[in-house]
Amino acid sequence: MDQRISRPTDAPALVHRGARGLDDQTPAAVAPDAAPTEPFVVPPEELPRHVAIIMDGNRRWAKARGQSEMDGHSAGVENIRAIIRHSVRRGIAVLSLYAFSRENWARSDDEVAGLFFLLEKVIRNETAELKEQGAQVRLLGRMDELPEGARESISRAVAETAGGRRLQLNVAFNYSGRTELVDAARRLVCEQSQPEAIDEAALAASLYTAGLPDPDMVIRTGGEQRLSNFLIWQAAYAEIYFTDVLWPDFGQKEFDDALIEFASRQRRFGR
């Protein structure tokens, strides 16, 4: 399936080739979604309030199984449902998922189109489930640069889940931490803020995450050990948790392992 994507003018140049099209969109098997049977020993007050996840490893997961890259992305999307449910089960207040970075524009047209297709599909199909789970959806990123269908699906999900109070679900799509800071600075300039009025609080109030607590924990799956331009302002004091587990295999047990590790750390905040 030949796709032609209209990219932002400042998007990265194409660097990744070889993605297959959308001819095979059958989701692969993922971790089970049943409630965990093992007891969870971390008291609620020791859990992170805000968990951010860099969902890495979909393509490597697919390659190891002789499947297409889009099969890997489909499996990764399927896994999101289980992690959202488990976040609600554990009482996590805010969950931020890094779904598509602005650097991902450098991938092939077919892969970018496939990611947009999956985003639109999952939001359209899962909005009712998100409402049932009590999740409120917010997009982090430049939505105006997305295709019309994706924008409409996101706007509909945001409106329909506005009453959610159990989980704030942030989907970072077409997101870049540096771009977020640029947009915040532009907003302050447009508001004609005086230099002496621009402090950390003013800048934080101009970010995509305005009004939300900073992440207490950033999880990155897939074995890489970097933030990749994700919530670089907000994660200044976050606990970082790296795991070799690829995102489609990152299930409830793996999430609980991360939460247990978080509870074992002492957060000093420079003290």
Image (tube, helix red, strand yellow):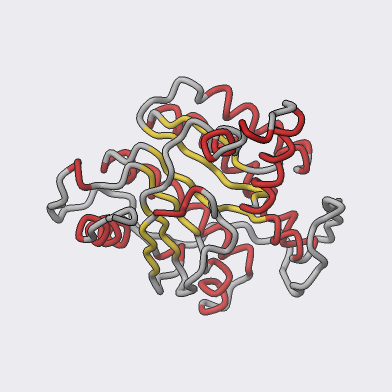
* Residue plotted at (39% across, 28% down): 134
Establish if 130 lies above or below 85.
above
Nearer-the-camera pick, 23 or 222: 222
Nearer-the-camera pick, 189 or 67: 189
Side (left or right) of 34 relative to 1: left
* Residue plotted at (53% across, 40% down): 200
Rendered location of residue 121, percent (x, y): 62, 42
Side (left or right) of 201 relative to 239: right
Rendered location of residue 43, percent (x, y): 15, 45
Nearer-the-camera pick, 90 or 11: 11
Rendered location of residue 110, percent (x, y): 77, 61
Quadrant of the drawing holding the N terminus: bottom right
Rendered location of residue 126, percent (x, y): 51, 37
Give the image quarter of residue 160: top right
Side (left or right) of 69 relative to 232: right
Establish if 52 lies above or below 203.
below
Q: How many numbered marks have been drawn onto this rendered protein structure?
A: 0
* Residue plotted at (34% across, 44% down): 87
* Residue plotted at (66% across, 39% down): 184
Quadrant of the drawing holding the C terminus: bottom left
Nearer-the-camera pick, 188 or 255: 188
